[in-house]
Image: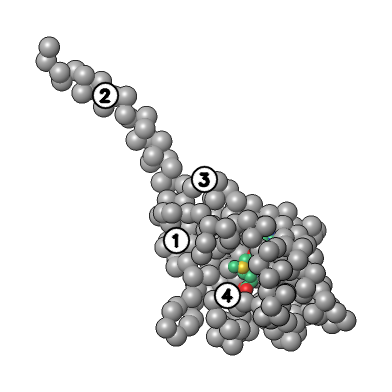
Amino acid sequence: MSGRYKELEYWDSRYEEEEQLLTGGHEWFGAYRDFAHLLRRELRPGTRGLVLGCGTSSLSAELHKEGVRPLVSIDYSPVCIKEMTQRNAGVPDMSWMVMDARHLQFPDGTFDLVIEKGTLDAMMVDEKDPWRVSQDTIALVDEVLSEVSRVLTPSGCFMSITFSPPHFRTQHYAQPKYGWSVSCDTYGRDFHYFFYTMHKGRQLTSLDLDRGQSLYKSYEDLEQTSTLLPCDDEDFLNNIQI
Ligand SMILES: C[S@@+](CC[C@H](N)C(=O)[O-])C[C@H]1O[C@@H](n2cnc3c(N)ncnc32)[C@H](O)[C@@H]1O
């Protein structure tokens, strides 16, 4: 993914270009049929859904066909939302809104299902070292996840579809404050993608709790190391024989 995937201007101009070229949109991380079996496990009659960073993907249309209604799809690109609103004009129980995933304008407990595909990846694209994610990115992802947790019902479910494997991604999701458990499946043939399912109202395993703690631990370690440095310097000075 390119570093520009974090910028709204990039997505607006990309969707404008797609519109002009009539490409019909780009599908990230494979076709719906590749992961539909994982998603269907969680669907119940009357599931109310929210798609975060919908882009021009067919995911929203597929969810609507599965009976996820009402279904709201948001993206912070006005160009994308205008295009998707026009394409789906007149479809009942389906709405499209320009909205930032960090500030969801819905009351607490509005949705049974929240799903994102590639949106968090786009937000994390600047990271050079997935083992030690910057504090800015940790905070950015936390803003989104806190909002997702807030708008979910007490037994709701969050799905996240990404190319990021558990040793990098689970640490973000496995925070007790979100009030959910984390599980991960893979799909795809040549290249494997990851399908995370977070269930509200269920406990994190002790392994996932440890993973969640490791997100902040690398910074605590760093702080401890840097507070030790002056002593190291003093030892070094003491050892100089003048
Ligand atoms: C990699 S694309 C994925 C699009 C779509 N979900 C798919 O699977 O094809 C990332 C999408 O996230 C949107 N996005 C990025 N940051 C966002 C934010 N803070 N709030 C809402 N949408 C955002 C972009 O405009 C873009 O449409």
Task: For the residues labelled 2 and 3, say whether their Cβ atoms are less than 8 Å apart.
Answer: no
Viewer-side residue, 2 vs 168: 2
Q: CA distance from mark 4 to mark 1?
A: 19 Å
- In the image, residue 229 lies at what x, y percent? 31, 29
Image quadrant in which the C terminus is located: top left
The residue singled out by tag 1 in the image is 168
* Sooner in the amino-acid sequence: mark 2 or mark 3: 3
Say what amino acid the circle numbered 3 marks. Gln
Q: CA distance from mark 3 to mark 4?
A: 27 Å
- Which element type, helix, strand or loop, lies under badge 4? loop
The residue singled out by tag 2 in the image is 233
- Which element type, helix, strand or loop, lies under badge 1? helix
The residue singled out by tag 3 in the image is 135
Say what amino acid the circle numbered 1 marks. Phe
Viewer-side residue, 82 vs 118: 82
* Sooner in the amino-acid sequence: mark 4 or mark 1: 4
Q: Residue furthest top?
A: 242
- Which element type, helix, strand or loop, lies under badge 3? helix
